[in-house]
């Protein structure tokens, strides 16, 4: 019999605090319309603060406790972005709590506002390292080098092919259905509908296929035809699980199912195998979105705006600042492409 080791403070709680957290969960779900994942993250950070104050009542909060908690998080060597998120969840809760009966005279709004990092720390939290991405030439070369013999080979090739064409988020790529790939007036696109696919913030959009060489789209369409011939319905996953089993002759059989791939890790492993096999460093599937954003920066404003819509960004600033950062090579190339003396005129 194995005894499960308990985490520190796992059994500790404050009954009054628990009641208020329960009410806050209901508030987040009904009025705040937050999803379950966000609610769990919020409660997790509130409990972290509870553990810090040894499960005293929330009414004990004051400006000194705010400073002490920030110092605690900082000394724990957490990143500034992690600290900012922890403080934001706690502030939202305390601001809500300050309006509840029994806490109005005990919590001070100004003290809650102390839960903030300095301006320089916030800037450091927003700063991000340069994110590498492949060129389209490297992506196309890798797809063409992938094997195309078994059904699993064909599925994996179509998977990376569709990502090259549409640069979806990984959860969208994993959950795309057969019916989401549509042809209208000779133009292929993905109907990234939140009813079918796991889209960010449950937002739907149309994602047109990029004008890549014909063989990239053909591999995707060929895989779709295989699925349809096997009896897949339009509501079935475009990239289903393929079971590997040994048959009675001790030979490996691959059986395509109608079950969706459950884990993003499975998707990442397919990309890793393909790109390392082609002799390239592995970059995650999300890097394809950086590839198209950086390419779009060098094209017309209309093309850049169309890419913004494809990526699902509400603001062009997101496309440019978060995704469109040029590589150092492209940066130098753009600067040096100017005629000598133009800047000095």
Image (cartoon, rainbow, N blue to C red):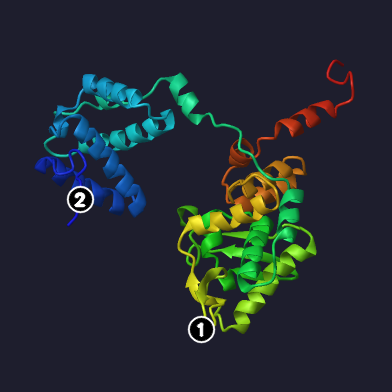
Q: Quadrant of the C terminus?
A: top right
Q: Is residue 176 left or right of residue 7?
A: right
Q: What residue sits 83% from the left and 26% below the top?
A: 336
How would you rate the neighbour count of disc 1 (Cα within 10 Å): few for under 14, some for 14-19, many for 20 or more? few
Along the line of sight, which residue is nearer the eye, 211 or 184? Answer: 211
* Disc assigned to residue 287: none
Q: What is the quadrant of residue 344 in the picture?
A: top right
Q: Quadrant of the N terminus?
A: bottom left
Q: Position of residue 328 (x, y in %)?
A: 71, 30
Q: What residue sits 49% from the left and 65% below the top?
A: 261
How would you rate the neighbour count of disc 2 (Cα within 10 Å): few for under 14, some for 14-19, many for 20 or more? few
Query: Where does label 2 land, which residue?
Result: 4
Along the line of sight, which residue is nearer the eye, 234 or 2? Answer: 2
Along the line of sight, which residue is nearer the eye, 248 or 17? Answer: 248
Q: Determine the residue located farthest toward the top in the rendered image.
A: 344
Cα–Cα span, label 2 and label 1: 41 Å
Q: What residue sits 45% from the left and 25% below the top?
A: 122
Q: Sequence order check: which comes first, mark 2 or mark 1?
A: 2
* Disc assigned to residue 248: 1
The nearer-to-camera label among 2 and 1 is 1
Would residue 300 be seen by someone viewing this image from the given angle? yes
Q: Position of residue 322 (x, y in %)?
A: 59, 38
**187 versus 287 height, above or below:** below
Along the line of sight, which residue is nearer the eye, 107 or 5? Answer: 5
**Badges 2 and 1: C-beta atoms under 8 Å apart?**
no
Q: Secondary structure at mark 1?
A: loop
Q: Position of residue 296 (x, y in %)?
A: 72, 44
Q: Is residue 1 left or right of residue 210?
A: left
Q: Secondary structure at mark 2?
A: loop
């Amino acid at each position: 019999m194995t005894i499960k080791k308990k985490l520190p403070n796992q059994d500790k709680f404050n009954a009054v605090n628990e009641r208020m957290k329960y009410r806050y969960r209901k508030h987040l779900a009904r009025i705040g319309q937050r999803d379950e994942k966000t609610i769990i993250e919020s409660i997790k950070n509130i409990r972290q603060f509870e553990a810090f104050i040894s499960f005293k009542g929330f009414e004990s909060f004051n400006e000194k406790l705010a400073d002490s908690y920030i110092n605690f998080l900082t000394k724990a060597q957490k990143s500034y972005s992690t600290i900012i998120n922890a403080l934001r969840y706690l502030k939202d809760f305390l601001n809500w709590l300050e309006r509840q009966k029994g806490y109005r005279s005990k919590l001070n709004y100004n003290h809650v506002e102390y839960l903030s990092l300095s301006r320089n720390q916030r800037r450091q939290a927003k700063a991000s390292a340069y994110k590498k991405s492949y060129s389209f030439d490297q992506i196309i070369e890798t797809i063409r080098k992938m094997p195309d013999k078994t059904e699993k080979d064909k599925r994996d090739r179509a998977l990376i092919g569709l990502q090259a064409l549409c640069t979806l988020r990984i959860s969208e790529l994993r959950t795309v259905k057969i019916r989401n790939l549509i042809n209208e007036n000779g133009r292929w696109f993905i109907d990234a509908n939140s009813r079918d696919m796991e889209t960010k913030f449950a937002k739907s959009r149309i994602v047109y296929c990029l004008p890549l060489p014909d063989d990239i789209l053909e591999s995707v369409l060929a895989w779709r035809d295989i699925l349809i011939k096997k009896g897949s319905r339009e509501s079935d996953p475009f990239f289903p699980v393929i079971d590997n089993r040994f048959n009675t002759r001790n030979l490996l059989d691959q059986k395509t199912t109608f079950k969706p791939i459950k884990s993003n890790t499975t998707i990442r492993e397919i990309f890793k195998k393909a790109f390392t096999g082609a002799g390239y460093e592995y970059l995650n599937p999300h890097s394809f979105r950086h590839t198209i954003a950086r390419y779009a920066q060098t094209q017309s404003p209309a093309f850049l705006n169309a890419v913004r819509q494809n990526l699902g960004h509400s603001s062009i600033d997101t496309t440019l600042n978060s995704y469109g950062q040029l590589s150092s090579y492209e940066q130098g190339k753009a600067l040096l492409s100017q005629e000598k003396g133009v800047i000095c005129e």
